[in-house]
Amino acid sequence: MSDLLSGSEPASDYDASSIQVLEDMEHVRLRPGMYIGGKDDRALHHMVAEIIDNSMDEAVAGHATWIEVELHENGHVSVRDNGRGIPTGPHPKDPTKSALEIIFCTLNAGGKFSGDSYETSGGLHGVGSSVVNALSDHLRVEVARNKELYAMEFSRGIPQGKLERIGAAPNRRGTAVTFHPDAEIFGSLKLKPARLFKMARSKAYLFSGVEIRWKTAINDGETPQEAKFHFPGGLADYLKEAMGGASTYSEAPFAGSVSFEKFKVPGKVEWAINWTPARDGFIQSYCNTVPTPEGGTHEAGFWAAILKGIKAYGELVNNRKAATITREDLVAGAGALVSCFIREPEFVGQTKDRLATVEAQRMVENAVRDHFDNWLAADTKSAGAILDFLVLRAEERLRRRQEKETSRKTATQKLRLPGKLTDCSSKSREGTELFIVEGDSAGGSAKMARDRKTQALLPLRGKILNVLGAASSKLGSNAEISDLSQALGVSLGAKFNVDDLRYDKVIIMTDADVDGAHIAALLMTFFFTQMRPMIDAGHLYLACPPLYRLTQGSRRVYCLDEAERDVWLEKGLGGSGKIDVSRFKGLGEMDAKDLKDTTMNPATRKLIRVTIDEDEPGQTGDLVERLMGKKPELRFEYIQDNARFVEELDV
């Protein structure tokens, strides 16, 4: 304590010299996740969005009528507009640098802080342009302003020279930014034409006063190489495209635009919504043309207006069941778009995924509510159809809630299992796991290794029925299938409902050998044909038990296969003495500690989530039918077609 009071440094590797002060561009490159969310594909494309948003701010402010987005063959991307152009004069606080250089090389520098240049804008923190500059190995800015053309180039945030005057430009105005994402940051990731095309088109929908021009030199086979977007109908046009021709309860959507003039602040809200029985619901929201995928206060205000309006209409027509409708019911079958323009919005994080401006909720709710009441009253046919649909959704939701509240114990008592279901104690589905294990011996070790609160066990006797190779009449009479469906709390086929599932994860845990793989294949075939929504929702997993255990002194290592075993044998375990190799013939040979550490403990195990990845609908079903169906000739044909891909067989 005396050392601290006297100001002397205690002996340590951590001293005053350990404190680093990074320049703006260095900090962005060291911690890109703080500014664009990471180094992944989403972050890469977010860089383009930052530059487009600057041009959109010019358009929304009334200074630009078109924006051009071009993806070049060499991976560069250009964004041009016909706005006012970035200021090029010396900056008052540092006359040795131009305002353009300050904008592209300094965090928290921009023209959107005072509110004098932009009433509403997507850029708020003055970091968009400078972050893109820092994360690009090359960036060039051209500005046509006051009939003069200027240019400046950068690399990784560092100017490659001063701002140059190129010459006269009497017929040109605006800003053009061309940049190439740095491979040191993003590795082999490349900008995708389809994703940029969708981004450019969405911007045109969000502001009807701008034309978006698209160009690409990269032919991906699905994206047009040139296009122009201008949508006078705004969000109503956007919703029509998003619904994809699905039948709706109202011929025309509830759509509109209202300014915030009565709140004595600049800005407005635009929206479009309709309900359909043909697809799941969705909502896309934006603030100042910036997507807010996590919603926020503007979404909350919008749904509050719709919910209050539909309940009020239900009361008006004496439909007492309307009072049970919740926001969950509204969202379930609705296609909705909400876009607000407000001054100085507050977002959660630099990537602006969620709007946090408190006033936005009140302004959006008040602006939308009156118009929704009038719309319902003016079209009673559509209003009645929507109300009936929402009441049915509410009744279905309440019915499911009541069914879920049925005691887990009751469901367990119905089971007739050779090796009884060993259930977990949790009353909620969240976080629970059902292990489908192969045989009673494995079940014995698993009972001791499991977490009793969240992990349940269902031992199966032998191989489950191949549902594709058996008559449909056998499904209902098969004991294993009946036991399994009862344990899960669901029905089969068309009657299956993923909301009825009693466990959060269903984990197939079989031996790490050929027989175990066959059992896993039979189970996956069963789930795919009878409970596919469970797979689509991400509830089905495969456990990864090890095949080998290596021991050297006090050191113990588990290996999934021969290749991993050979790697460890070559480099050693770090212990002393001979390395003992044990091969597990099955899960039943593993003691409880082995099984827990390798296969059941969420902190140390490996799981494979079963997913369905297909380019065309039905592709996976056709493959499953070929491999597991009744026609052996199709399997033989598949083996012949794919035998050349097998490099080695361990026989």
Image (cartoon, rainbow, N blue to C red):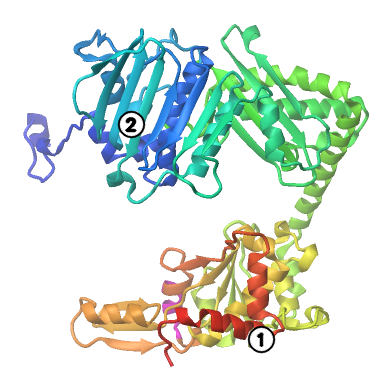
Toward which corner of the image does residue 569 lie, by quadrant? bottom left
Question: Which residue extends farthest right?
Answer: 318
Q: Which of marks 1 and 2 is in front?
A: 1
Q: Earlier in the sequence, mark 1 or mark 2?
A: 2
Q: Position of residue 502 (x, y in %)?
A: 68, 63
- In the rendered structure, the answer to whether residue 69 lies left or right of residue 612 reads left
What residue is disc 2 on?
131
Relative height, residue 549 to residue 203 (above, below): below
- In the rendered structure, the answer to whether residue 382 lies left or right of residue 524 reads right
Q: Is there any visible trace of residue 619 in the rendered image?
A: yes
Main SS of the magenta segment?
helix
Relative height, residue 232 to residue 296 (above, below): above
Q: What residue type is labelled 2?
A: Val
Mark 1 and 2 residues: CB-CB less than 8 Å, in contact? Answer: no
Q: Which mark identifies residue 468?
A: none
Question: Which residue extends farthest bottom?
Answer: 651
Q: Where is residue 286 in the image (x, y as percent from the top left)?
A: 57, 29
Q: Where is residue 140 in the image (x, y as percent from the top left)?
A: 30, 28
Residue shown at the point (78%, 41%) measured from the top left: 276
Q: Around disc 2, counting alpha carbons within 10 Å, would you say few (fewer than 14), some (14 to 19), or many (20 or more)?
A: many
Q: Position of residue 87 (x, y in %)?
A: 33, 12
Q: What residue type is labelled 1?
A: Glu
Q: How many marks?
A: 2
**The C terminus is located in which quarter?**
bottom left
Q: Around disc 1, counting alpha carbons within 10 Å, would you say few (fewer than 14), some (14 to 19), or many (20 or more)?
A: few
Which is more toward the observer, 472 or 138?
138
Relative height, residue 72 to residue 115 (above, below): below
The part of the chain drawn in magenta is 590-597
Relative height, residue 158 to residue 476 (above, below): above
- In the rendered structure, the answer to whether residue 345 lies left or right of residue 583 reads right
What residue is disc 1 on?
633
Which is more toward the observer, 332 or 445?
332
